[in-house]
Amino acid sequence: MNPDEIRKEVSEWLDANWTPDRSLIEWRNMLLEGGWAAPDWPEDCFGRGFNAEQAAVVNEVFAEKGAVSAAQVGPRRLAAETILVHGSEDQKKRYLPPILTGEHAWCQLFSEPGSGSDLAGASTRAELVDGQWIINGQKVWNTSAHHADYGILVARTDWDLPKHQGLSYFLINMRQPGVEARPLRQMNGHASFNEVFMTDAVIPAEDLMGGEGNGWAIATTTLSIERQGFARGRTPTASRKPTEGPIYQELATELEIANEPYTWYPQREGRIDLVLPRAKETGAIEDPAVRQEIARLMCLSNGARLAAASAAAQRKSGSNEVIPAGSIGKLGASVIARQAAHVHTMISGADAMLSGPDSAEEGMIAETLISVPAISIAGGTDEIQRNIISERVLGMPKEQRSDTGPFRDIKRNVT
Amino acid sequence: MQIEYTEDQEQFREVVSRFLQAKSTPIDVRRLMASNEGYDQAVWQQLCGEVGLAGTHIPEEYGGFGFGPIELGIVSEEMGRHLYCGPFFASSVMAGYALLNGATEAIKSAILPDIASGDRIATLVLDNLNNPEKVGSVLKANDEHVVSGTAPIVVDAHIADLLIVAASTSDGLGLYLVNADADGISIKPEEALDPTRKISRVSFDGVSSERIGGLNEESLNLTWDQICNALAHEMIGGAQHLFESTVEYTKVRVQFGRPIGSFQALKHRCADLLMELEFAKAATHHAAFCLATSEGEPFAASMAKAMASDTYMEAARAGVQLRGGIGFTWEEDTHLWYKRAKSSEVFMGSAHMHRERMMKMIEIAPSHNTGEQP
Ligand SMILES: Cc1cc2nc3c(=O)[nH]c(=O)nc-3n(C[C@H](O)[C@H](O)[C@H](O)COP(=O)(O)OP(=O)(O)OC[C@H]3O[C@@H](n4cnc5c(N)ncnc54)[C@H](O)[C@@H]3O)c2cc1C
């Protein structure tokens, strides 16, 4: 379908169906049935098989008409897109619709106190007892776990196999007595991530995904989806035009909860949108040193954007010389965030000593300066991205390993 | 606006690349850089005749191919990759663009066909290669079209038939046509840091010339952008060659019982460099796409040149460093590209100048597209 046909079809459908008077869940179920909840998903999986451009047209029309779309915020997308690739028919049917309707929020239970970068070293234990998986162990840094209904979980099902082979991938219900999420306070004062304790938590046998022992391969899918998200970034969304009707109230409540862990995410990307306005307002734009650094930042951010666009175009045209954009984009996002924080610091001068409501941009600059360190850690550190780029993209030889053989015998952190 | 090359453009690249791979090997480069002329006439004639590259961006009505900055970028990128030695950049790119933007119809019709065919070699004489704002501060022409002054760095003037001289006049920057053997001209070959690009010092001691047009602020800046676009492509081609050959070297050189490419310090340096190179390459291709349609960010060419300057040198430094002692020898080829990188870094404006130029463009036209807003 070309953009005009899509625009016509979605407009007609919205004109016939959209009204702010329905309840949120009723409306989202209609979206699901109409195939407009996730148009970029496959046709046999609640979608229409649209490519990114086609899906963007749908989003545009929704935005123009002020129509509410499927639930988006948080790690639910990470879960959904992994289930799309690796889930069984039954798992897709049970888990994908409530993700789109907003009934289920998800979190990512990968990192542990003893293994972060080394995700394959996870030591959360999963044992099959009387046809159910019993989970014991601790996860950490899990964003949104305190609101989540479900989690994607990597746990060890075999301790005698080499580390990558003994892992399995589960879909776990967070609302059960054996799971406890405790928010952790971050260096920027927010508490979006948690530590999650699992004590004899229960997972039905059918919620192991992709077969026992295949956890590593599936986790790799999740991580690569996550990296692409970092590279795309999230600019702060302009406030919607005033909209009235009961559904907007419900949506506002939903977003207030769902967005709560993410209010600082635009700041961790460096708030490049504030650089020029601040430089002009403070007069720092007259300073030749500041000008150089602003221009450097522009080079980086435009370079990253253009490289991603050209990689995407090449992927579409099926070129085999494609640079996997995820890791380069994620590394780029870190470099850009750091450069932006550097520029903001130069612009602010001693004012950068302040934070809170009286400080620049009502505290947003200060929050930027103390939030950017997150972006080079979350979703795989810069160092890990450099390992991936050098080994998988450039084909440089792998590091010598000291973690082969049965997992049981490998040196680990004492926890 | 384009975001990737068309199939035709990819095929064109193939043709150019195959030609240069055969005709511009490191052995050829070494032979030519040691020679006085600095280029191989037979190869130049083939390049202009059979392959027709010298007229890539020159309109068909003036005997060229009628392609634009994108195809010129492709040619330049491949030339940079293979370190092609010859008057292409001086004659086709620099003089060609100055004539296209500033000369009268009659002159364009008279000279451009010869530039496109390679029958005559021209070069653009600028008294300042640092900043377009400073062009015309030394070379002057009086109302009788007598040119005086010295241009300390003129590429390929030693083999040029025609000099296209930008000199300031009572009514702005004029363009003058001077035969290289005219009375009062001295062309003194200089020692170039990059011996693959020959440089002369050109002095005009009251040379009677023909006024063939002029460049105003807009057309001078356009010319500068177009030249920078070609140059940035050339630099990206060179940077890619250096990067690829360096990564390959780390896979085969063994120390401490393992390939040096398995050491993380080297891997991370290469990963960072790949990112920088991908960004600079995308920005450079984008500059050509912008120039082709006169759309996009007004500073696209300066952005490309600033990024190419930094990235080419970064690749050159890594190229030497990651090879160790052999990288510092005359015998190994890395220094050929290192020197091209160093000299290109400052040719037509340093990264600093171009970043400042970007900032000015943003300030002049605040409503203009600044790309992804920083
Ligand atoms: C804001 C935020 C949100 C997060 N959200 C989630 C979430 O929702 N779910 C989840 O599961 N996790 C989450 N994480 C965790 C994140 O994925 C890990 O913190 C990260 O992968 C690093 O692991 P680690 O903290 O154990 O550090 P470590 O792995 O111990 O790393 C410490 C240092 O050693 C370096 N290092 C480690 N291995 C290597 C190597 N092979 N080569 C070179 N250097 C190396 C690292 O780069 C780092 O600098 C989040 C983290 C942050 C900061």
Image (cartoon, rainbow, N blue to C red):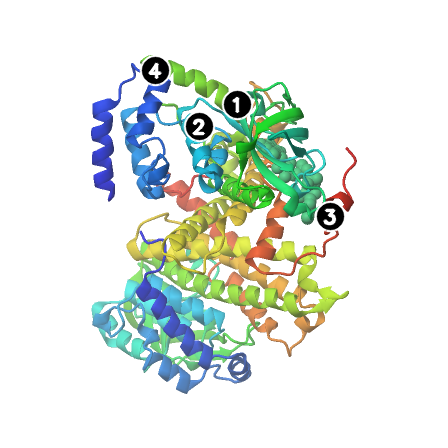
SS under mark 4: loop
| Number of the front mark, 3 or 2 | 3
Q: Amino acid at mark 1?
A: Asp
Q: Quadrant of the N terminus of chain A?
A: top left
Q: Position of residue A229 (x, y in %)?
A: 49, 39
Query: Which residue is labeled 2 in the image?
Result: A99
Q: Is mark 4 within 8 Å of ligand 1?
A: no
* Residue that carries the numbered disc 3 in the rendered image: A406
Where is residue B367 shown, x and y percent of the image? 34, 38
Q: Is residue B7 left or right of residue A129?
A: left
Q: Residue at x 77, y 38 (%)?
A: A413
In the rendered structure, the residue with mark 4 lies on which chain? A
**In what quadrant of the picture does the C terminus of chain A appear?**
top right
- What separation in Å lies between label 2 and label 4 (alpha carbons)? 17 Å
Sooner in the amino-acid sequence: mark 1 or mark 4 = 4
CA–CA distance between discs 3 and 2?
37 Å
Q: Residue furthest front?
A: A130
Depth check, mark 1 against mark 4: the one in front is 1
Q: According to the image, label 4 marks what residue? A: A23
